[in-house]
């Protein structure tokens, strides 16, 4: 009886998260995030929703659970910390792979 052969193939994957803004600065601003303790990009709620690929309710739930950072402007616009959003997206992709 012939012996069975097992071939193991290993691959290495590197990912990079790119968040693109729709037009011009797309509502983007740079400001201090107290939760990140650093200067970060802040993006509009709509851009955060598009970058995360989910609905408004999901973004609001992430904000309520302090998984992503947010700030209200004097005009009443909700801005989202791009650094915390990027971290959340990457963690979500890693959890989906396991």
Image (cartoon, grey):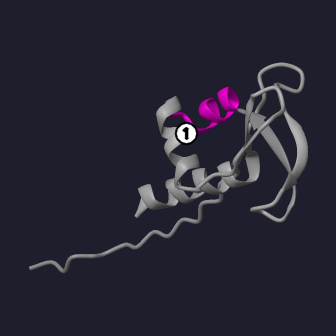
Count of numbered badges drawn on the protein: 1
Task: Determine which quarter of the picture holds residue 39.
Answer: bottom right
Please state the horizontal and vertical placement of residue 55, each as a whole percent of the image: 49, 30
Residue 63 locus on image (x, y percent)? 58, 47
- The N terminus lies in quadrant: bottom left
* Secondary structure mainly formed by the magenta segment: helix
Identify the residue at image location x=53%, y=30%.
Answer: 56
Magenta residue check for 23: no
Query: Which of the two residues, 2 or 20, is positioned nearer the viewer here?
Result: 20
Residue at coordinates 70% horizontally, 51% vertically from top-left? 16
45 vs 64, left or right, is right
Name the element at disc 1.
helix
Q: Pinpoint residue 75: horizontal percent, then vertical percent.
A: 82, 26
Q: Is residue 77 above or below residue 10?
A: above
- The answer to which quarter of the image holds residue 79 is top right
Q: Which residue is most to the top?
A: 23
Q: Give yes or no for residue 46 being in the magenta stretch.
A: yes
Q: Is residue 91 above or below residue 45?
A: below
Is 3 or 49 nearer to us in this picture? Answer: 49
User: Which residue does the numbered mark 1 point to in the structure image?
Assistant: 59
Q: Residue furthest left?
A: 1
Q: Residue visible at 75% across and 28% down? A: 76
Task: Identify whether 70 is placed above or below 45.
Answer: below
The C terminus lies in which quarter of the figure? bottom left
Pick the front one: 10 or 80: 80
Which contiguous range is marked in magenta? Answer: 45-54
Residue name at image x 60 percent, y 60 percent: 13
Left or right relative to 71: residue 51 = left
Where is residue 78? Give x, y as percent. Answer: 71, 34
Density class for disc 1 (Cα within 10 Å; few <14, some 14-19, many ≥20) is many
Q: Is 20 left, or right, of 55 in this rendering?
A: right
């Amino acid at each position: 009886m012939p012996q069975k052969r097992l071939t193991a193939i290993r691959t290495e994957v590197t990912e990079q998260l790119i968040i693109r803004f729709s037009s011009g600065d797309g509502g983007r601003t740079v400001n201090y995030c107290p939760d990140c303790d650093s200067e970060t990009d802040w993006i509009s709620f709509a851009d955060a929703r598009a970058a995360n690929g989910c609905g408004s309710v999901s973004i609001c739930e992430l904000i309520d659970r302090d998984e992503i950072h947010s700030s209200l402007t004097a005009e009443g616009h909700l801005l989202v910390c791009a650094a915390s959003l990027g971290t959340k997206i990457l963690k979500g992709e890693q959890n989906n792979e396991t």
